Image (spheres, helix red, strand yellow):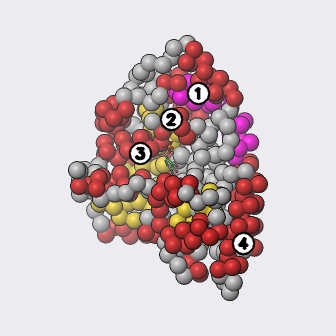
């Protein structure tokens, strides 16, 4: 066996979702799958693609029309890429994998947020790169001082940014974006910015990818799993300069050849004609976020207000129990599944992740159960 692979584990999010299946009557708030259907015209475009036999390999980087359309879409956020700087991938996951594999050498250091989406750390371990975590502020925004300090004192080559964040819902403010841009200009680093949830944001959107002057240091990863509720159709993309893309495409080619052809036609239709559906979904998530915030505050749980994505990350520290144990107890006794914060790395200890991409009824029942569970088990907290 590859000893590096042996060092990592299947994602804690998945492991926990599996446990839920064995608990009769449990409600799960564990998954990052929007509860909306794929927009109708997107599914029709995919059916049409099948009927027209568009089921063959596409070019490695994907169909031209979709890459063009992605450029137009990104331009609406002031992010400039050319069609040839875009590669369609098998979900954002394969995008991240191909990027990190193409860039990093064993022993090199990568700076990753903690807590964070688990792929960054685990892919890095597989490559035998050395992971260094940067801290987040109390409201989970990026702690630029800590990033600076770590860049100053350690030989770090890569930095991961991830906004809106899974699991915290934090985003980048204009000031933070500008400060990061200045920092990136000064340093010899490559930044991978994972913006999987950029369409689900409740305030103004800012990204380091908007600054043209640092384009040669930025690799942008995103996708359609969340925005068109098509997590199973596996379509994402990477955008970067050709000097990076020519290496990334090799990893991509030998790993997957190309992204699924049918899903590429679906995403194309989505970008052309379904952005209104995305906006409606975004508004629904914002309303649900407000509901979750109110219920958590009523329960006197400390929580930072999410500004994007569809996750909320309350502190459970006051219950004095490891987050894994707390979530197991909540599942077995309270019949409610939330993901332990440690599924997002050791800096997630003391938190749990609630995904609110579930219906209003499910959310209400889930919070009623949480309330009852806390009353019974922690009456003095
Ligand atoms: N990046 C982040 C922050 C995510 O939360 C996810 C999935 O949940 C991904 C990347 C991977 O996305 P995909 O399902 O398209 O592979």
Image depth: mark 4 or mark 3 in front: 4
Does label 1 or label 4 sit earlier along the sequence? 1
Counting from the top left corner in percent of width and height, residue 264 is at 52, 27
Span colored in magenta: 263-282
Q: Is mark 3 within 8 Å of ligand 1?
A: yes
Q: Disc 3 marks which residue?
A: 96
Residue lying at the far bottom of the rendered structure: 380
Q: Quadrant of residue 95?
A: top left
Q: CA distance from mark 3 to mark 1?
A: 22 Å
Dominant secondary-structure state across the stretch colored magenta: helix
Q: Residue at x 69, y 84 (%)?
A: 379
- Give the numbered dot on residue 371: 4
The answer as to whether callout 2 falls within 8 Å of ligand 1 is yes
Specify which label sits upstream in the sequence, 2 or 3.
3
Q: Nearer the viewer, residue 21 or 102?
A: 21
Of the 4 image quadrants, the one containing the C terminus is: bottom right
Quote the CA–CA distance across marks 1 and 4: 41 Å
CA gap, disc 2 and disc 1: 9 Å
Label 2: which secondary element:
loop
């Amino acid at each position: 066996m590859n000893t590096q692979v042996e060092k990592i584990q299947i994602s804690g999010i998945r492991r926990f979702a599996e446990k839920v299946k064995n608990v009769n009557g449990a409600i799960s708030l564990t998954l990052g799958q929007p509860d909306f259907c794929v927009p109708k015209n997107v599914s029709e475009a995919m059916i049409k693609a099948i009927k027209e036999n568009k089921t063959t390999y596409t070019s490695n980087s994907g169909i031209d029309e979709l890459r063009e359309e992605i450029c137009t879409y990104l331009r609406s956020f002031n992010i400039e890429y050319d069609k040839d700087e875009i590669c369609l991938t098998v979900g954002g996951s394969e995008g991240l994998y191909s990027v990190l594999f193409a860039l990093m050498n064993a022993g090199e250091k990568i700076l990753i947020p903690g807590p964070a989406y688990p792929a960054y750390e685990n892919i890095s371990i597989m490559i035998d790169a050395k992971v260094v975590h940067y801290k987040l502020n109390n409201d989970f925004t990026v702690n630029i001082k800590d990033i600076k300090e770590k860049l100053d004192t350690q030989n770090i080559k890569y930095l991961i940014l991830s906004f809106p964040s899974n699991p915290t819902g934090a985003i980048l403010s204009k000031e933070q974006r500008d400060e990061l841009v200045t920092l990136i200009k000064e340093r010899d680093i490559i930044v991978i910015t994972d913006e999987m949830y950029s369409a689900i944001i409740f305030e103004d959107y800012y990204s380091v990818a908007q600054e043209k002057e640092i384009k040669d240091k930025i690799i942008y990863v995103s996708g359609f799993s969340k925005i068109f509720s098509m997590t199973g159709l596996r379509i994402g993309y990477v955008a970067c300069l050709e000097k990076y893309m020519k290496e990334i495409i090799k990893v991509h080619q030998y790993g997957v050849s190309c992204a699924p052809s049918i899903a590429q036609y679906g995403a194309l239709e989505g970008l052309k004609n379904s952005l209104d559906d995305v906006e409606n979904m975004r508004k629904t998530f914002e309303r649900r976020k407000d509901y979750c915030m109110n219920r958590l505050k009523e329960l006197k749980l400390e929580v930072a207000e999410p500004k994007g994505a569809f996750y909320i990350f309350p502190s459970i520290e006051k219950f004095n129990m490891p987050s894994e144990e707390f979530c197991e107890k909540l599942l077995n006794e309270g019949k409610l599944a939330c993901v332990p914060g440690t599924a997002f790395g050791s800096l997630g200890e003391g938190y749990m992740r609630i995904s609110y991409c579930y219906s209003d009824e499910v959310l209400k029942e889930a919070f009623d159960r949480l309330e009852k569970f806390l009353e019974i088990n922690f009456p003095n907290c």
